[in-house]
Image (cartoon, grey):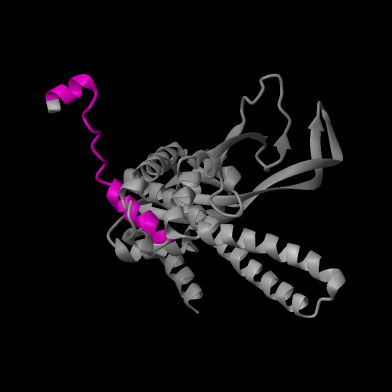
Amino acid sequence: MSVFGHLFGHEKKQDSPALLPAIERAVAGVEPRLKLISGYPDSYRKPVAIALEYAHSLAAKVPGPVVVNRESYASDAFVHALFPAVDSVMEALCSSVALQDYQRDFPASDELYALMGMRRHEKTVVGMELSGQTIQRDVVQQAVFFNSHTIENPAPSEQQARDQVAWSFFDSLVVKVKKRVELRKQDKQSQLHDKDLLMARLRTANALTRTALEQELAKLLNSMQSTISSLELGNYIEDFEAVLLNPEQHLRLVQTPIILDSMGIRRENNDAGTAGAIIFNDLIGYDRRDWTVTMVHCNDIQGESFSARLEQAYRKLSI
C-alpha cells in the first residue's frame, strides 16, 4: 500500500507528533467538554495544524537575537533606541518575573535567550536642530521611546526560546477562539434580560401597545434561539475554524522602519529612502495593545552585579 499509495498520491500524510497534544491544549483552553462529543479530535486536526504551523513560522520571524547589556547599549543603535538610558537595560532585565523564575529553575546557567516586548510611543517635544552651520532652537520634533519592557519565554538556547514563543502565539490564537464563544454567552445573558423586561411590559400592556410588544418579543425569541443553537458544543468547531484557519488575520508581525538620531528623535526619510532606518517589528493582535518585539540574548548573567540587582528586584516584588 505504501508503494502504490506514494505513486498515486493516496498515502495519508502522517500527523506531526505535536498535533494531538496541540488539539488537546486548544480544546482544553476553550471548552474541555468538547473531548466528549463526536468528531473529536478529527474535526480539529486541520485548523489546529494550520495554526500550530503558523505560530512556529511567526516565532521564527521574530528578529534577533540581539545581545542586551551595557556594552550593546553603546554599540548597537537598535538596543540604544529601546532604552532611555544605559542603567535602564539592567533595570528592565532585573524587574522581569520570568527571568527571576528562570534563575531559580536554572541556577547554574550563565546565559539565556528570550522574547522581549516593549510599548513604543511617540510624543511631540521642542528641541534644537542643526541646519547647515546654524543651530535652530525651539524646533518641534517627534521623540520615539519605549517602556514596559517585558521578558517572556526565557530558555537556555535560542531554539528552545523560539519554541516556547511559538506555543505562546498558539495559545493567543486559542484565546481568540474562546472570546468568540464568550461573546455569544454574553449575548445570551443580555437577551434573557431583555426578554424578562419585555414579559414584564406585556403583563401591564394595553391594547394599543400589546401588538408591538408581542412582535418585538417574537423577534427577540427568534434571535435567542439562534444564539442558543450556536452555543451547542457541536457548533464550537466553527469558532476554531474562523480563527485557526486564518491565523494571519488575528496575529501577525508588522515591520516599521524609523530613522532615529542618537537622542531618539525621528528624522524624515532622505533621498536614500529608509537607508539608515531601524526596523522595528510590531506584534499585532497578541493582546489589546501592540508590542514591539525582538529575541534577546543575555550572557554573563551570573555576574555579581547582575545577581545582586536581580535579588534586590525580587525582594521588592515580594513585598
Magenta run includes residue 15: yes
- Horizontally, residue 305 falls left or right of residue 121, namely left
Please provide percent x and percent y for residue 38.
Answer: 32, 55
Foreground pick, 262 / 143: 143
- Horizontally, residue 313 falls left or right of residue 111, namely right
Residue visible at 67% across and 42% down in the picture: 264
Which quarter of the image is occupied by the N terminus? top left
Above or below for 72 versus 35: above
Foreground pick, 188 / 48: 188
- Horizontally, residue 285 falls left or right of residue 44, namely right
Please provide percent x and percent y for residue 280.
Answer: 57, 39
Q: Is residue 300 visible?
A: no
Residue 307 picture quarter: bottom left
Please provide percent x and percent y for residue 278.
Answer: 59, 34
Magenta run includes residue 268: no
Residue visible at 25% across and 34% down in the picture: 13
Q: Is residue 253 visible?
A: yes
Magenta residues, as a range?
3-30
Above or below for 256 versus 250: above
- Horizontally, residue 240 falls left or right of residue 147, namely left
Secondary structure mostly taken by the magenta-highlighted segment of the chain: helix
Above or below for 185 versus 288: below
